[in-house]
Amino acid sequence: MDITLIVVLVIALALFFDFTNGFHDTANAMATPIATGAMKPKVAVTVAAVLNLVGAFLSTAVATSISHGLINEGPGGVAITPEMIFAGLIGAVVWNMITWLRGLPSSSSHALFGGLIGAAIVGAGFDSVNYAALLTVVIIPAFLSPVIAALVSLLATRIAYRVTRRPVFPNERGGFRIGQVFTSSMVSLAHGTNDAQKTMGVITLTLIASGAQSANQGVQFWVVVACALAIALGTYTGGWRIIRTLGSGLTEIRATQGFAAEASTAATILASSHLGFALSTTQVSSGSIIGAGLGRRGSKIQWSTAGKIVVAWFITLPAAAAVGAIASGIARLGVGGLVIDAIVGAAVILGLYLWSLRKPHDQAAAIEVDVAANAVFTRKELRDMQRKKRAAQVAERRAELSRERTLRRMAGRNGGRR
Amino acid sequence: MGIDWFAFLTVAIVAVVSACFVVLVYSIGLRLWSAADTRAGKYTVKDDGTVGPATAGFPQPGTVQPGVRAFRALAVACFAVSGLAVLYGIYLIVPQFH
């Protein structure tokens, strides 16, 4: 086996995975500030890119296992060969591209786990997967994290609206936009520290496996730089399709909701990563947005979009595993298989990219309809509608207050107390 | 197969408490800020409790109420507390700090 070829292929593909991870997850932090106008789109992705870059440099602890115990690695288990890593990465990248094309936010880590699992099953048999860990690390959090996030965000949104309620004072809900800049930036930074590290782990473990570096040596500096740049570049490219889905496809987000949602996302992610188990950023942030939508009276949630997103979460792991398994099967043919893998993988990725260019401004037809519901009105029309609605509300409140005053006067006349 | 349900519960509770705390403090800050604006005569409060922008010159005579500075100071204090929460979050994110 030509060890140099496989190492080069894995590193290139790992960096590309890092890139897709970046543009897939820009939306988690930046969809709501872009939707509410807290930051201009270009500014938002630039801030996210810089914070991801900084985050990648901050966190360089060596990962001891790529798969978080999903695959029985180490003594007594199977050795993950660079071929398996390569096949797993193909699965992860292809699935990331497909979900991006459909505008669906799905977890990049689950795609990576899925790809590795598929590759390991083909490469080393069904015993190589730790199914108990699969349940605790992937499946149960996938059910719980959106629910927890939605609950947190629902409560936070209610509180925010209750405290800044009209019409006692002119409300300053515009001020939530400033807060949003900070909460979104925190989500971005947290993402950078977590996700770039994953790719660094993959590359470092490949280098160790191939004997290019010793096991007790930390992450090499060029690996850190390359991963940081790849994730930052991906973030800067901006997954506009996913940003649109999260920013306006699920529900129409206002500044108050956006602030509450991002604060909840940041709080949930920080709590989860410091109290034991990691929840997927993507799932937490989607859950928060749904919670924020539930928290404001009169806001509608496109449950059909939400349903599609949930379906995407649950098929992410098996789908990436299937692609990983096929790639792993081909890779077993030897060097020729690896070359076939690389060429087919590159062709599929290029094909998906070209397909995305073919209709650059619509999302996949299914999502399009939901988004259209929010997008058919121009900003001006929406503003006019809101203004009319607000005028009606004020008139109603005035009438109510005057009724109350009359009642109070009547009560006063009778000597009663109200 | 040890599923740590207690850990899930802890995460949920900590997340609810911390997120709600930050949002509450920041919202109170915004509300106090707008209260200070109102007291400074930036708006006119009509008899029915609705609020409009000050019609003529600002501040309009008769609309200025005492306590502008106190409200502003309290609002700034609230923003400072939210700022501290953000700093604590950054402290948690950056591994070099602990």
Image (cartoon, grey):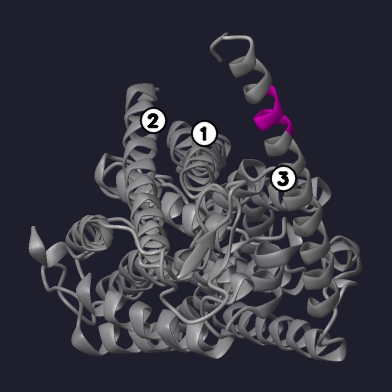
Q: Which residues are magenta?
A: A403-407
Residue A90: horizontal and vertical position, in percent?
A: 59, 72
Q: Is residue A299 magenta?
A: no
Task: Give the number of the mark in front: 2 or 3.
Answer: 3
Between A105 and B90, the residue placed more toward the observer is B90
Sort mark 2 into few (<14), some (14-19) or many (20+) by Cα contacts within 10 Å.
Answer: many
* Secondary structure that dominates the magenta span: helix
Callouts 2 and 1 close, C-beta under 8 Å: yes
Q: Give the left or right position of residue A414, taking residue A228 as reference.
A: right
In whole angstroms, how far apart are the C-alphas of marks 2 and 1? 10 Å
Determine the secondary structure under disc 1. helix
Identify which amino acid the numbered label 3 is placed on: Arg
Determine the secondary structure under disc 2. helix
Q: Which residue does the numbered mark 3 point to in the structure image?
A: A398
Where is residue A386, by image quadrant? bottom right
Residue drawn 50% across the image and 66% down it:
B43
Determine the secondary structure under disc 3. helix
Task: Specify whether disc 2 shares its chain with disc 1.
Answer: no
